[in-house]
Amino acid sequence: MSGGAAPLIAIALRDGTVLRVEAVGVRLGDRLYELARIQDARQVAPDPETFALRVAGSGLVEFQPAHVGDGAVALEALFRLRPDLRPAGFEPPRPPAPGMYPPAPPPYDPAPMGNYPPYPPPPPAGYGMPPAPSAQGYPPYPPYPPYPPAGSPAPVFVPVGMRGPNTGHGGLTQMPRTFGELLGATFTLFGRHLGSWLTLAIVTALVPAILAGMARITATRLLGLDRLVGGQITFDPSAQSCPFPAIIQPARGDALIQGAAVIAGFVALAVMLDAWAKASLALGVRDAILGRRVAVGGSLAGGLRRLPRTLGASIIVWALTYGLLAPSFVLIAVSFANLKGVDLCAATTAPLPDAVAGAAALEVLGAFLLLPATVLALFFAARLGLAPYVAATERIGMWAALGKSWRLTRGSFWRTLGVMLLIFLLVAVVQSVGGQSALASVEIAYLAVVPILALFTVPLTVISRVVLLYDLRLRREGYANVTGAIQTPREAREEAPRPAQPLG
């Protein structure tokens, strides 16, 4: 016998194979469907009796028992191993309690009376009721609802007027979430544990935001862009000459080298601390999704242990997304630099100088490359954007986290991209509101306002990614594998029903 262990239940099927319910799963012929990956099990047709299993990664698996009633026995054995699979209202049969039904009447005695012939015996239907009509007189069974396509979650039926299992909380259930429920779970978890998120963000996210602000201020002064903030660049349309202003005036010599080194140091330290913030917040969100207590100290310590792989995955994702956009922005910046000193008023009447033609060509090329670069950046952001959070919440390495993010998002690209884009736009709007203070003071904007807003925007972003991650894991791996709520083979054998004589 394949598998090396006696089955709990074994039934013959109409196609000549044998279905066995074992402690580790359901074996159909030579194929074993692991217990943790089974998402649904029920009867789907009455005649001939047909039963179906929905298995994560394998889709719909149907079988037809050779003998009527064997399928129900197999399902009951499976429900003993996985009680969460039993449909609501389909409890195991129990014998009636004593006294529930009245005692049966004494048998009818057709004793003769006088010279009359004896009465005929009552019909077998009993109690004077007419015999039940034949099954041919009944209307056919209503058609069963079709199963969703392969890879979809098991159906969950919600009575009219009742809330769905994913409504009003952010915890993980056996039913995957819709797009709206993913957003609802994100904001529910954000508000329910706001104190924990703010505490984690103050420790881990505030310093990276301040360091990023210092890098921005240094870069602004190094490139001479602080003149744009102060409004020092003016243009007089009535003047006879209107030279194009020098928007970028970078420092030269040692000042440029020293400034670049300072910026690189700020960015490196900010990226490292940002990875710690992602890992710590992701662990806290994982505990909240699984119904555990959010421990701030445990999340900080766990995030520090997972810092290297989270940092590595984050760097690779950033390099693939922002690295694709860098050439377009560089070309556009160079085109503006080439226009320095060009008389725009004279260019409208005289032939275009070579500098203007070259700048226009660079700008057109940069804009032409920007569209495909944006499409590729969004593609890699959606397919690999969950890798840092996989590395933070699971005990796997950086490359394994990248591969798992790629596999989980296969077939769910638009849902993943939609959630990420919506949260990104919301965060961008909040940060742009805070960035308006840069018109008054760059220091106040980048060292005070933006870091304070980061205490709210960073946890919101991490919560949305982890909620999305666990929804995709539920769709691919099944509820028992994600939560770890699966019995050991020994526990399953102790609770399983004991058949009288296994087949095969």
Image (spheres, helix red, strand yellow):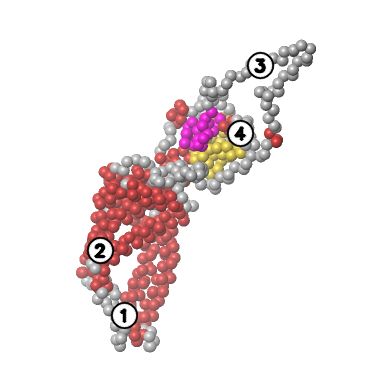
Q: Amino acid at mark 3?
A: Pro
What residue sits right under mark 2 in the picture? 445
Crowding near the residue tagged with mark 1, few <14, some 14–19, many ≥20 C-alpha atoms within 10 Å? some
Q: Residue at x 32, y 63 (%)?
A: 432
User: What is the quadrant of residue 12 in the picture?
Assistant: top right
- How far is mark 3 from mark 1, CA to CA? 114 Å
Q: Position of residue 380 (x, y in %)?
A: 42, 57
Count of number-bearing discs:
4
The residue stretch that appears in magenta: 73-93
Q: Which mark is residue 128?
A: none
Question: Left or right: 54 with respect to 219?
Answer: right
Q: Is residue 365 above or below residue 134?
A: below
Q: Amino acid at mark 4?
A: Pro
Q: Which residue is most to the front?
A: 114
Q: Position of residue 425 (x, y in %)?
A: 38, 60
What residue sits right under mark 3 in the picture? 107
Observer-side mark, 2 or 3, equals 3
- How far is mark 2 from mark 3, CA to CA? 96 Å
Observer-side mark, 3 or 4, equals 3
Lower sequence index among marks 3 and 1: 3
Q: Nearer the viewer, residue 500 or 187?
A: 187
Crowding near the residue tagged with mark 3, few <14, some 14–19, many ≥20 C-alpha atoms within 10 Å? few
From the image, which quarter does the C terminus lie in? top right
